[in-house]
Amino acid sequence: MKLVNRKFWISMAVAGCASASLTACFPLVVGGAAVGGLVATDRRASGTYLNDEGIELRSSSRIRDSLGERGHVNVTSYNTQVLLTGEVPSAQDKQLVEQIVRKVDNVKAIVNEVEVMGNSSLTQRSSDALVTGRVKASMVDAKDLFANAFKVVTERGTTYLMGRVTQREANRATDIARSTSGVQRVVRVFEIITEEELQGLMPAEPPKK
């Protein structure tokens, strides 16, 4: 399979996960290789991973109950730091959304990037999902990055990057995102760790026989 075709199918698969509002997808299988299984394991503790899943589900449900159809808000949690993106009709609603999420258990911090404007169209959301897929596919192809260490969210052409990463990884991922077709702006919501801390998070090599 040619590289361009491989990247296309990876991006389409990731876009499909994003457009379905899934917070996690099963490993992608492209050309017989399980892409998800080849990247580094998640850098969050298993309990934190589950907390993030719970934060996203509970926050999204409570926001929908409060706003109904008058707003479109996405909730993304990584290591209990929450990124809010989307659109609401008023500044009061923007603050309401943040207040709702602050009351959810285990939320450590909130980055409120919700815009006061009309809801984005389905066409725009589909385009954003495809851009997210392209960014993730480029990360998978990068030889010096662990794609599984990042969460990628795109909203109206702005791509947000989250994860527990070193400064080197943060800069590399930013360069990849900025060079991806469809990305108009990159916003970094990283938790920066040292190279020594990264080594402590890496799985130990099996003993040699």
Image (cartoon, rainbow, N blue to C red):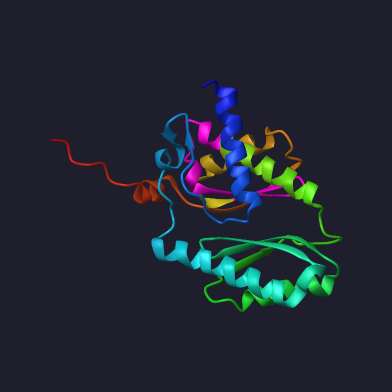
87, above or below 142, in the image: below
Residue 111 lies within the magenta run? no
Camera-side residue: 146 or 54?
54
Residue at image point 46% right, 44% down: 27
Q: Residue 72 is drawn in which quadrant?
A: bottom right
Camera-side residue: 89 or 179?
89
Give how far across and how far down residue 91 sits, in percent. 84, 70
Q: Is residue 191 left or right of residue 177?
A: left
Quadrant of the rendering where the C terminus is positioned: top left
Q: Is residue 59 left or right of residue 67?
A: left
Give how far across and how far down residue 114 sits, in percent. 76, 62
Q: Is residue 171 left or right of residue 70?
A: left
Specify whether residue 13 is in view.
yes
* Boundaries of the magenta span: 138-161
Give how far across and how far down residue 109 sits, in percent. 60, 68
Q: How many marks?
A: 0
Give how far across and how far down residue 110 sits, in percent. 64, 66
Residue at image point 51% right, 22% down: 1
118, above or below 168, in the image: below
Camera-side residue: 116 or 35?
35
